[in-house]
Amino acid sequence: MGLQSVSRGRTHQPCAACRMLRRRCDSSCILAPYFPCDEMDKFAKVHNVFGASNVIKMIQIVEERNREDAVKALVYEATARIRDPVYGSTGAICQLQKMVQELKMQL
């Protein structure tokens, strides 16, 4: 197998978002840097909670240097919302605060 056979093959795999949405993923895909093809579950959670078009809108309004952190926050919030549909991440924060108070009482 020479270099020719490797260069003829596809070098670009669609990102997890385009794969799930069954869209063509090109070099201008705004979701590709944050949802690589091997992280389908990450995009599935965000898509389930926020919807793909809302995720795209949110990413677009954030400055490019802050987008990675914004996507991490979206994934965290989506995961928390799936785990606890009523309180989401607020429920986790309240539980941790309660644990801190209980541990302070034990001191």
Image: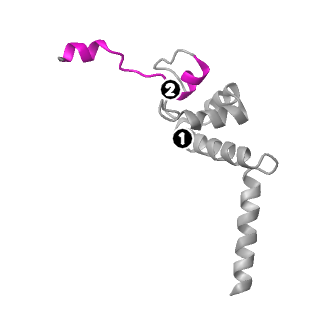
State the image coordinates of residue 24 (x, y, percent, origin top left): 53, 14
Mark 1 is on which residue type? Glu
The magenta-colored residue range is 3-22
Q: Dot 1: within a 10 Å radius of its alpha carbon, few (fewer than 14), some, or many (20 or more) residues?
A: some
Residue at x-position 64% and y-position 28%: 56
Residue 86 vs 39, above or below: the answer is below
Report the amino acid beneath label 2.
Cys
Magenta stretch: residue 51 in it? no
> Which numbered marker is on residue 10?
none
Main structural element of the magenta stretch: helix, strand or loop?
Answer: helix
Rendered view: 56 above or below 1: below
Q: How far apart are labels 1 and 2 at the CA level?
A: 15 Å
As helix, strand or loop, the secondary structure at mark 1 comes to helix
Q: Is residue 21 magenta?
A: yes
Residue 27 image offset from top left, x and y in percent: 45, 20
Q: Residue furthest right?
A: 86
Residue 73 place in picture, x, y as percent: 63, 45
Which numbered disc, 1 or 2, marks the residue that appears first in the sequence? Answer: 2
Is 84 left or right of 79, judged from the image as shown?
Answer: right
Q: Position of residue 63 (x, y in %)?
A: 58, 36
Q: Between 107 and 31, which is closer to the camera in this rendering? A: 107
Report the residue marked by disc 1: 68
In this rendering, is residue 11 above or below 40?
A: above
Q: Quadrant of residue 20?
A: top right
Q: Please name the residue that numbered disc 2 is placed on.
A: 15
Camera-side residue of 67 and 71: 71
Q: Residue at 54% of width from left, 41% of height from top?
A: 68
Q: Pick the quarter of the image with the N terminus.
A: top left
Outermost residue, front side? 1
